[in-house]
Image: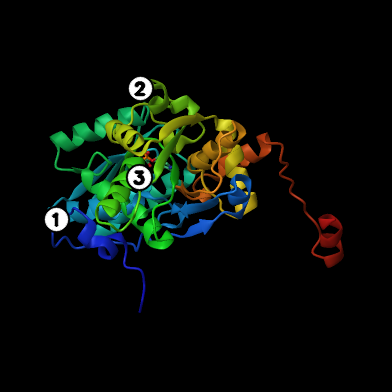
Amino acid sequence: THQWRGVIEEYRALLDIPAGTPAITLREGGTPLVHSEWLSGLTDAEVWLKVEGDNPTGSFKDRGMTAAISVARHQGAEAVVCASTGNTSASMAAYAAKARLKPLVLVPEGKIAAGKMAQAIMHGARVIMVRGNFDDCLRLAKGLAEEYPVALVNSVNPVRLEGQKTAAFEIVDFLGDAPDFHLLPVGNAGNIAAYWLGYRQYADLGLASRRPVMRGFQAAGASPLVTGEPFPDPETKATAIRIGNPASWHLAVAARDESGGRFAAVSDEQILEAQRALASHDGVFVEPASAAGVAGMLAELEAGESYAGSSVVVTVTGHGLKDTVTALEGFASGGGSIVDTVVDAEVAAAARAAG
Ligand code: F0G
């Protein structure tokens, strides 16, 4: 009788969405904050992983999507559109199905992980592949929403951030206060903006005594917030964050500046290595982009930075099963061997093969 109700019903009084909006929910949120013995040991800090892959469609996008779809439905929309590197489209399609809205998805051709594409298709989305990158897709989605009766649910829709900020609430509710540091991957920059909204709100309400220092990590080949310039041709194996001109640029910079934080870049090799290490040390399998925060922390440690004595939350944004191809390519390129050992169906044979 005590099932988690989803982020709208759990936090409705703290969310800026129209009063009386019925919640379209798949019981998103309420994700685990997993203590990382591995990272805590490396840093001499208390390091927690906010495991957002445990959401209904396997990424943090569900928090914002329950809000955006609930409001769109309440306001009479019949169709919804988004541009996506994969997770937003998977989430939008699922919530649109639940709300009986027509989902239309724009994705960059050839740059979407198979699991995410399968989700969008299975949930009934019309998927359009665009010859271009995510930034092109977002321009098209905005254009379609301006000219046709279809509601845009990318994070330029402020309702998305209202839902996503609940992750910060959950962290403070669990830890009893905000952490000293919060690290996360950054692509279109909606998530870091949403976390900062949430942390600020809790501090303003006296529900937290402080706000964390925000550190955002981008893939080196798609790191406009690090260089300060848009990337016309973003490129990274972490396709979820293959974005050259983040929509929430100004909000992300404000989060950095108001928190005394920073943005930094990590290479694809560092990302894939962090992904493997997280899976093998902590039992948490995340998709490549989701490991950018952990990769950033490891790079900082190597550069002599210290987190000693502090509390740190690292958001891991999406599930590893979304993109097994890149994970196994990374495993192989990191020197791992994937051996198919086939034996006869006998204990002795299995024991011999197991060594
Ligand atoms: N991690 C994952 C797994 C993502 O899918 C995304 C964004 C991010 C991190 C970055 O979050 O954009 O709020 O800075 N994915 C979007 C999508 C762009 O279309 O699914 P952000």
3D distance between C-alphas at marks 2 and 3: 21 Å
- Give the mark nearest the N terminus, 2 or 3: 3
**Label 3 residue SS:** helix
The part of the image, by quadrant, that contains residue 269 is: top right
- Give the mark nearest the N terminus, 2 or 1: 1
Q: Tell me where residue 281 appears, x and y as whole percent.
A: 64, 51
- Is the residue marked by circle 1 packed among few (<14), some (14-19), or many (20+) residues within 10 Å? few
**Label 1 residue SS:** loop
* 125 shown above or below 27: above
Q: Tell me where residue 83 appears, x and y as whole percent.
A: 31, 37
Per the rendering, the mark at residue 298 is none
- Is the residue marked by circle 2 packed among few (<14), some (14-19), or many (20+) residues within 10 Å? some
Disc 3 residue lies near ligand 1 with CB under 8 A: yes
- Give the mark nearest the N terminus, 1 or 3: 1
Per the rendering, the mark at residue 88 is 3
Would you say the residues marked 2 and 1 are in contact, meaning their CB atoms lie under 8 Å apart?
A: no
Q: Residue at x 37, y 20 (%)?
A: 232
What residue did someone put label 2 on? 230
**Residue 121 visible in image:** yes
Left or right of 57 on screen, residue 81:
left
Q: Amino acid at mark 2?
A: Pro
